[in-house]
Amino acid sequence: MLTSEYKRGLTNGGIEGGSICRGVIRAANELGVSVEEVVGPIRSDRHNESVDRARRLEYAADLISTKAPQPPRSIVGRSPRRGGGGANLHTHRIASALLGGEREEIPQETRRRGSARAKK
């Protein structure tokens, strides 16, 4: 019965047909019937090939990581094990070199002013 109702939804088409097809799939899930048992007999060879291709593409998409790799410690700053953290002058030099800036040291007075502002 579910297969015949699904066929009816396909022949009707449009919003009504889509509603019938969605209802059949929900009913199949509630009754514990596999959707493949309902839809499988209706599919042609072209449809089956498309389903297989979609499964392969979904599998391949799951192989791609969604997390960006962490930057190396030499760029981020000193490791916590060595007794420091955050950015230091060495990190500033590397970062400016990566961004295309010059490798100049920051004048001593500029560093003092910046640290005095941070303390206030």
Image (spheres, rainbow, N blue to C red):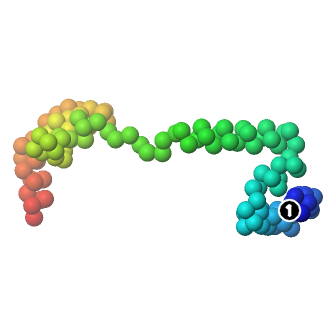
Q: Residue at x 75, y 56 (%)?
A: 34
Q: Is residue 4 visible?
A: yes
Q: Determine which quarter of the picture holds residue 97.
A: top left
Q: In x, y percent, where is residue 100?
A: 31, 33
- Give the quadrant of the N terminus: bottom right
In depth, the one of 111 and 32 nearer the eye is 32
Q: For the view shown, which residue lies furthest in the front direction?
A: 32
For numbered disc 1, what is the local secondary structure?
helix
Q: Determine which quarter of the picture holds residue 94.
A: top left
- At label 1, the amino acid type is Leu
Q: Residues within 10 Å of mark 1 (few under 14, many from 20)?
A: some
Q: Residue at x 73, y 62 (%)?
A: 32
Q: In x, y percent, where is residue 27?
A: 77, 67
Q: Residue at x 12, y 59 (%)?
A: 117
Q: In x, y percent, where is residue 86?
A: 18, 47
Q: Determine which quarter of the picture holds residue 99.
A: top left
- Residue on which the image places disc 1: 2
1 in relation to 76, above or below? below
Q: Is residue 15 left or right of residue 106?
A: right
Q: Is residue 9 visible?
A: no
In depth, the one of 53 and 90 nearer the eye is 53
